[in-house]
Amino acid sequence: MATEQQVSKEAMATVAEKAPITAERKVRNDLETKLPKPYMPRAMTAPDTENINGTWGHKHCNMSVLQQHAAFFDQDKDGIIYPSETYRGFRALGFNVVASFIFMVLVHAAMSYATLPTWMPSPYFAIHIENIHRAKHGSDSGAYDTEGRYIPANLENLFSKYACTVPDKLTFKELWHMTQANRDAFDFFGWIASKLEWGVLYVLAKDEHGYLAKEAVRRCFDGSLFEYCAKSQKGAVGKLG
């Protein structure tokens, strides 16, 4: 018979012998020693094991983490993002005219209707930040919950599973593998959206060696990365130019 200690060990196991994929994609089992309640969704901050209080100096303005992620593109801070604001936001990040226009069309075509306060479509294709959680799609990383809160453990597990070359950094190949692994069955929209979002982030934030750092990903989730990149890109050549 199994001892109490064996039963306890099995109850906490993260690898199942008959599911090799659980050994291939390892998850961290030390999070609670480095980050208080890592599985508790955070409403306004995006912490990780190196930044337990979130991004230093970043103002959340009492918005959810997902709302903060979108707020950079709200140029006039009225709570509504219009296509022209999204275009200017991508230009501020360093993307060229063509890329910024394409991103603007894709973002507003995909997200506008879901965030509207009424069932009537908006001729302006506006995105309402208050309802941005409604635009959350499937096949994503799971870092946001359905209300737009941020779950630290899912960011940590993303890197423990897929950052095989350098800890806390993703190569493009690993990023692609991650988006493939996160696909939900028959979620064609989610598959494409996830690939595009992570692809844009990779182009925006990869380092000189072609790695996407965990810190860049974490700060993308709370939007502080966009603020940083916009400041650093002033006067620079377009990213895709």
Image: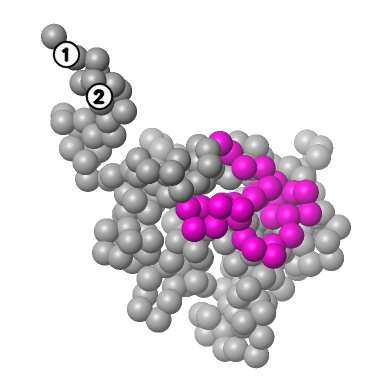
Residue visible at 79% across and 67% down in the picture: 75
Residue type at mark 1: give it: Ala
Residue visible at 40% across and 81% down in the picture: 208
Res 23 visible: yes
Residue 52: within the magenta? yes
Circles 1, 2 touching at the beta carbon (< 8 Å): yes
Res 145 visible: no
Percent position (x, y) of residue 204? Answer: 52, 72
Q: Which mark is residue 2?
A: 1
**Horizontal side of residue 200 vs 87, given as left or right:** left
Secondary structure mostly seen in the magenta stretch = loop
* Above/below status of 150 relative to 78: above
* Above/below status of 183 relative to 53: above
Residue 41: within the magenta? yes
Mark 1 crowdedness (10 Å alpha carbons): few <14, some 14-19, many ≥20: few
**Horizontal side of residue 80 vs 140, given as left or right:** right
Residue type at mark 2: give it: Glu
Percent position (x, y) of residue 225? Answer: 60, 67
Q: Which mark is residue 87?
A: none
**Horizontal side of residue 144 vs 14, given as left or right:** right
* Above/below status of 184 relative to 55: above
Mark 1 vs 2, N-terminal side: 1
For residue 26, what is the image quadrant?
Answer: top left
Percent position (x, y) of residue 82? Answer: 77, 60
Q: State which region is magenta.
A: 40-68
Q: Which mark is residue 10?
A: 2
Percent position (x, y) of residue 190? Answer: 48, 45
State the separation of the CA atoms marked 1 and 2. Answer: 10 Å
Q: Could you say whether the residue bearing mark 1 is in a helix, strand or loop?
A: loop
Q: Could you say whether the residue bearing mark 2 is in a helix, strand or loop?
A: helix
